[in-house]
Image (cartoon, coloured by chain):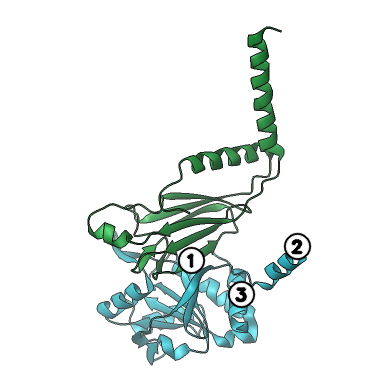
Amino acid sequence: MRPRSAALVTIAAITAAVLAWSGFAPIHIASRNEVFVIPKGTWARRMSGDKVEILPDHIRLTLGLRDILVLRNRDDVPQIFGPTLMMPGQSFSLPFAQASEYTFNCTAHVSGQMTIIVEPYPASPWARVRWRARKLLSELHEPVGTS
Amino acid sequence: MAAVAAGAAAAPAFKAGLFDPPRQAPDFSLQGTDGHELRMSRYRGKVVLLAFGYSSCTAVCPITLATLAAARRELGPAAADVQVLYVTVDPERDVPARLEAFLHNFDATFIGGTGTPQQLAGVRQDYGISAQKLVTRDGYAYSHSSFTYLIDRGGRIRALMPYGHSPEDYVNDLKILLKE
């Protein structure tokens, strides 16, 4: 076999192995919480004219894997965060049990709304591949304010 | 592993979103549809379901109130320790008689609250409720927060149930709070 062909075969084999693992290996996660935090000093930064974006307009959750939205106010003042008013130091944990699209009023957003998309558990191999790929991408682009 | 499973089983699983730590529900003084002053502190010792809306609401409020009424029916005698309070965001139209008639379509024990626009704005601010008046072809409507607060016997805001949950979800959470 020529060296170039051997390299292509190797790449194809590795790709197939990664896809097979992504599709068939069970998904293990440490926590079902998707956490967003208002850091200390956010209010002061906003008052000084700094545009601080904590919550994305759209939050994507997955049943059985990451289906609890956790909001934490670490600032020194009460904040409207997501759907609710939160006192300094307070957390709010909202579990989801049905795959659907949820819209909440949220004054933290320019649109005045926050959308939470809850997707079903990735039961099929292809769904697991997509879930793992999206997780990898989101970890590469983790927004400020999450933890 | 067994201990972890036992611990998980022992922890009550709420369907609503939980506050940690819970804060004391701010007190207020409004005009109640039962002819008395409506104060949150008056219901200490009961589990309170607190919702905001208006009697002309055609989208959210009828469904929420029907759900709360169904949950109370499902609870049976234990419902005597559950009080539904419904504070209007539309004092212009929701005079006590109109609000009472609206609420009694769902459950005769529901108590509504109204007041001056300033009083109601203060209550909304204390509870983080949004209400925006929108001009419509027929007059006006409100876009308002659609969730319901669950307040425990000690008067603490324990949980927030988003719009759309079933009576069974409310019953689940109410049973947890009633046992405390």
| Picture quadrant of residue B117 | bottom left
- Image vertical order of residue B46 relative to residue B150, above or below: below
Residue at the bottom extreme, as displayed: B36
Crowding at mark 1 (Cα within 10 Å: few <14, some 14-19, many 20+): many
In primary-sequence order, the first of circles 3 and 2 is 2
Nearer the observer, B161 or A25:
A25
Q: Secondary structure at mark 3?
A: helix
Q: Which residue is mark 3?
A: B171
Residue A73 location (% of width, % of height):
41, 64
Q: Examine the rendering and report whether any part of residue A140 can be seen.
A: yes
- Image vertical order of residue A1 relative to residue B113, above or below: above
Going by the numbered disc 3, the residue's amino acid type is Val
Q: Which mark is residue B1?
A: 2
Crowding at mark 3 (Cα within 10 Å: few <14, some 14-19, many 20+): many
Figure quadrant of the C terminus of chain B: bottom right
| Picture quadrant of residue B116 | bottom left
Residue A114 location (% of width, % of height):
41, 54
Q: Which residue is mark 1?
A: A92
**Chain letter for the cyan part:** B
Q: Secondary structure at mark 2?
A: loop
Residue B17 location (% of width, % of height):
52, 67
Residue at the right extreme, as displayed: B2
- Residue occupying the point 35% across, 54% down: A109
Do labels 1 and 3 touch, CB within 8 Å?
Answer: no
Q: Nearer the observer, disc 3 or disc 2? A: 2
Q: Is there one chain holding both mark 2 and mark 1?
A: no
